[in-house]
Image: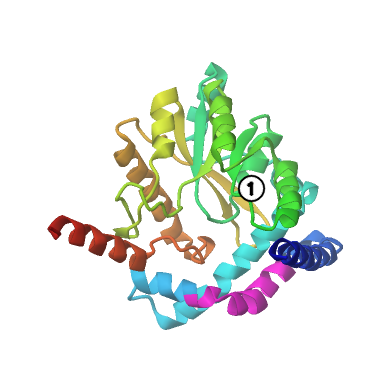
Amino acid sequence: MATEQTNWRDSLQNAALRGALGFALALPYRWRVPLIGWLVSRVVAPIAGWRRRIRGNLAHVCPDMDPAEVKRMTRAVPNNAGRTLIEIYSGREFLDRVKDLEPTGPGVAALREARAAGRPVILVTGHFGNYDAPRGALAAQGIPMAALYRPMRNAKFNAHYVNAMSTIASPVFPADRRGLIGLLKYLSTGNTIGVLIDIYATKGAKVSYFGKSAPTATSVAEWALKYDALLLPIYGIRLENGLDFEIRIDAPIPHTDPVTMTQALNDNLEALVRNHMDQWFWIHRRWKPGRQAGIQRKRAAASTGP
């Protein structure tokens, strides 16, 4: 019975979402993207509790932010998230916006040299701007970038979401054991992969982000060391018109040790976010201070126990 109820609920949710996406995709691109951004900002965000989460994250790391700016952020951040979602689903139209964008930044030459030499490359980004813009742009210019995706609980929705991601660039691998093996095999043969770094990891390194503890997996740095892969930060920075992007590649992260390299990646992302605060997904539970405090209490109790 539970499975039947879950299937029914998933089907209903998927039908509703497909209907909304179908309506949006019928509109011209230049109207579609800002419309969905507005709807997510003004309708979805309040219902989903995103505004409260944004305020909580900002209070945690930017307690002195002006209240008027906090209010603006609670609208601007979901707007960017909505634009990103519909851009991913826009497939070829989205690719047409990014396919001819020449990357900028101090890491461009290093990327080209690594590609010419057949050296593996790990491009690291965050939930910022549109993180699929660099993937689409580079793939269109002959640099396919494999990526991981986290499968969604709703299998019906997951199927067309993966299809949308694959339209932008391929291959894509699920973030499970089998998918990870496939991703690393792809990397080890001299290819390029893209990875998101700004994800809370309970057992991750005790590094910081915006001056606060933000446990982060060191896997990316470990892969770079194991496969002698070039490690480059890359971003799709949304421009003022809300539709176009700058593809920026920063200088390579030096190979030292996994924790130092992971902190360097966090620092690089933070520096960019501070210049474009409303383009990072402050909806994320990036720090989870309550959980971290609970873990510390358990460790303290264990160390002082009988």
Which one is nearer the viewer's eye here, 21 or 268?
21
Left or right: residue 299 versus residue 269 is left
Q: Is residue 15 above or below residue 147?
A: below
What residue is rendered at 71% in x and 61% in y?
Answer: 3
What residue is rendered at 48% in x and 73% in y?
Answer: 53
What residue is rendered at 50% in x and 51% in y?
Answer: 126
Q: Position of residue 158 (x, y in %)?
A: 70, 52
Quarter of the figure that contains the C terminus: bottom left
Q: Does residue 251 show up? A: no
Q: Residues within 10 Å of mark 1 (few under 14, many from 20)?
A: many
Residue situated furthest right in the rendering: 26
Secondary element at tag 1: helix
Q: Does residue 25 show up? A: yes
What residue is rendered at 55% in x and 31% in y?
Answer: 181
Instruction: Kindly identify the amino acid type of the residue bearing the numbered disc 1.
Output: Ala
- Colour logic: rainbow
Image quarter for residue 251? top left
Q: Position of residue 172 (x, y in %)?
A: 65, 39
Image quarter for residue 46? bottom right
Q: Is residue 117 above or below residue 226?
A: above
Quarter of the figure that contains the N terminus: bottom right
Considering the whole magenta stretch, tell me its main secondary structure: helix
Magenta stretch in the rendered image? 34-52
Q: Position of residue 22 (x, y in %)?
A: 84, 62
Q: Is 120 contained in the magenta span?
A: no
Q: Is 41 contained in the magenta span?
A: yes
Left or right: residue 275 versus residue 116 is left
Residue that numbered label 1 is attached to: 133
Q: Position of residue 33 (x, y in %)?
A: 73, 63
